Amino acid sequence: MQNDAITALNASWVAPVVPRQQLWADFSVVMHQDRIIDLISTKDLAEKYPHADCVDLSGHLLIPGLVNLHTHAAMSLMRGRADDLPLQDWLQKNIWPLENQVMSAEFVKDGTLLACAEMLRGGVTCFNDMYFFPESAAKAAIEVHMRASLGILAIESHSAYGMDALDYLNKGLATRDALRDESLISFCLAPHAPYSVSNQTLERIALYAAELDLPVHIHLHEAIDEIEQSLQQYQVRPLKRLQHLGLVDPHLVAVHAVHLNTEEIELLSEHGAHVAHCPTSNLKLANGLCDVGALLKAGVNVGLGSDGSASNNRLDILAEMRLGALLAKFKQNDAGVINVHQALEMATLNGAKALGLDQKIGSLEIGKKADIVAVNLNTLELSPCYHPLSHLTYSAGRENVNHVWVDGVQVLQHGQLLHIDQDALIKSTQHWFEIIKRDSAC
Amino acid sequence: MQNDAITALNASWVAPVVPRQQLWADFSVVMHQDRIIDLISTKDLAEKYPHADCVDLSGHLLIPGLVNLHTHAAMSLMRGRADDLPLQDWLQKNIWPLENQVMSAEFVKDGTLLACAEMLRGGVTCFNDMYFFPESAAKAAIEVHMRASLGILAIESHSAYGMDALDYLNKGLATRDALRDESLISFCLAPHAPYSVSNQTLERIALYAAELDLPVHIHLHEAIDEIEQSLQQYQVRPLKRLQHLGLVDPHLVAVHAVHLNTEEIELLSEHGAHVAHCPTSNLKLANGLCDVGALLKAGVNVGLGSDGSASNNRLDILAEMRLGALLAKFKQNDAGVINVHQALEMATLNGAKALGLDQKIGSLEIGKKADIVAVNLNTLELSPCYHPLSHLTYSAGRENVNHVWVDGVQVLQHGQLLHIDQDALIKSTQHWFEIIKRDSAC
């Protein structure tokens, strides 16, 4: 986008998310540089912005860019290597050995590039990553012009990336320092899980979180085993343990939160903690269902995550939005739980809030960053269209995402990525395919 | 296809479904007229079939056409009119009043045409329909060259189509007589549900089923209300009532089967009855989860249905296959329940079996009808590909369906329908949109 150029996206519908539960017909989102500078009825556009470059998006619905609140992006190179296995078998006997064999800065760069391409094509403009070599993930995100929140990882076990938790933390903090001027990049502290991180490390993370005002992104209450192990080792359930260590506060992003009792839901609510709901992953690993209806009722902020490609296997927040809405109805035995506006909030603003980015992204508002997705509703599968947000939630798929802007820059046009050669990217995956096929036992 | 022409589809992978759990690399499916005449390694093709017309499908996986075991196709014109409502509110206060206002032969023809177009584009080659004016649905299916099993409907309440159950049955049977030479069309008896059809009508249907050897397609044990009402009115649960009326046998296709106790699962198994599992619909209307793992373990044949567009809202059997596999793991608390081969069986052969069509369709075997789907796995989202059936089940979507053949005739090529003008079809939906917007209170 040129410095002085004003661009107007003239759409059939705009769902701004803020103000809540609105849907505006024949509306324009006006952008200048990286920002949204106006939202205005298209009929009034020419008078107010006579020199705007107009993009005709008739038949399209504009929504804020989707936020993927939990993923391990580079695992896209392992998609389909280990299906139909329970969490610990999947992780300890398949994924970890495989990671040990292939892990490198190059692996993370290439895998994250692939994941970013997939996510952008599906309307995801920001992802919250937890993985090794976050500096490589950052490079990939910057290369495709995507927003990323990167994990300052902590895990006690060593890897090609780090020796121990302290080493991981130091490397992650150094990466954060090195990238502090990148407008697309932010950071979370990312202790892997209660069962893989010590009290000492968690205490250190609590200090960093307070000092640096960083979110803490952690797998929590994902599986029954995790809770039983915690009771045995620490005599408390994991969430309580985190509370004792000073980690239950508005920085906490509890990923999965499948197994919560009423007291624990209250605890999250009282302390302003967030949940990253990953419905497909929870079903696929047979971990259970997060009770989103109860969490929302208690006032807990719930965003949506895809988890990594090895346990989903789509980095597809529109699909998680649909599944999240459907499962919440089942779980509460009430078809009215999660309406289509709430589903979109979970997929956008709620994720941004959890990452501390809701002043910048998550809704289409004047002054916010122009992270915008145009969904084409003028297709055979979506005709006729009585209710664009119903179609978005229950009928559309990522195949309907047509155009995407991140930070004011168009990155997807008619389904084609503008900052990366898709065919070359597909070919590059073959390199890792050969290595993984050759080296891995699974 | 020309009479003497032999066509070979040369694919990177073929999943024939029969024999079970097979995946053949670099394989060809050879067709002549409406039949599969051979399955052969592509390297041996030129020698055996030197004059075959070859279709290069590198990067593609060939699977049998998907079977949608339960839908109300014409309801695609109502998609998104009534979301987030429980079953009886949805049906009695929204859908039935709406249907009363718009129902006609033309509505069913146009709605079914739209549904057929959507289904073909998603790799569904055969659907089992339950709706008014089945002769109109048949016309639509024949027009787009799609296989359909049509319901000989029975319901006690009157409509624009019929006065009473007997009238519906007579009209349905007359339609069956009129279309007996159509190779793409078959029929089921289709009593609507236990709560909407009398004992007298059900007894008549049992007689017809035996006499004409027709499947009986009925909503069954979908919601708790249905079971409670049956206990009150008939002092037995609906399945038991059907058994007393002679309807529990290999003709029975029990749609939904969400609420079954152990004895009822045994009853279905012992009598060779079938289940049409509609996972999205069950979640969306908050009815519950069919225990597919338990049914399969008991030897019950389970196929997949989309249900109608008003309660799903995608006529997308690939999506139901994915969701069915995921939910079965959750329900049984075992990530190993439903592997990717079983998921494909449910979406193809099991549906064909339930419809009594498994001698003709449901697998890629010599002598069967050439109902074939080519799924493009050579996309960014599906690269690299370690396991094509994992990708089909967990990663691909209907957007990856590239080519479709029905009865030996290509109906979809590079995602474009060959027997219908897609743009004209989208426009035609506008006519019904205006009527439904104007006339309906909801």
Image (spheres, coloured by chain):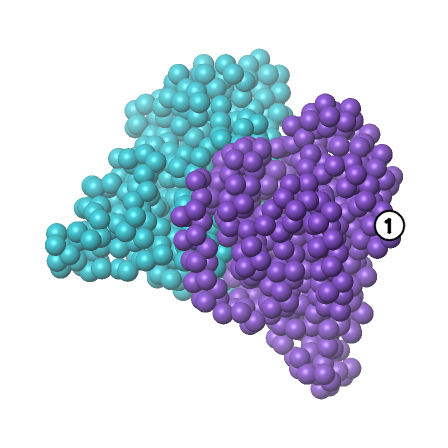
Chain colours: A purple, B cyan
Quadrant for the N terminus of chain A in the image: bottom right
Task: Give the amino acid at mark 1.
Answer: Ala
Residue drawn at point x = 63 percent, y = 55 percent = A133
Residue where numbered disc 1 is placed: A210
| Res. B24 visible in picture | yes
Q: Position of residue A410 (x, y in %)?
A: 62, 72
Taking B59 as reference, is B101 above or below it? Answer: above
Instruction: Name the residue furthest front.
Output: A163
**Label 1: element kind:** helix
Q: Position of residue A100 (x, y in %)?
A: 54, 45
Q: Position of residue B275 (x, y in %)?
A: 45, 29
Between residues B55 and B383, which one lies in front from this camera angle? Answer: B383
Q: Which image quarter: residue A228?
A: top right
Taking A162 as reference, is B173 above or below it? Answer: above
Task: Answer with left or right where residue A344 lies relative to residue B299.
Answer: right
> Callout 1 environment at 10 Å: few (<14), some (14 to 19), or many (20+)?
some
Q: Position of residue B283 (x, y in %)?
A: 60, 37
Between residues A238 and A211, which one lies in front from this camera angle? Answer: A211
Q: Which image quarter: residue B364?
A: top left
| Res. B159 visible in picture | no
Quadrant for the C terminus of chain A in the image: top left
Q: Which image quarter: residue B133?
A: top left
Residue drawn at point x = 41 percent, y = 53 percent = A434
Residue drawn at point x = 72 percent, y = 68 percent = A182
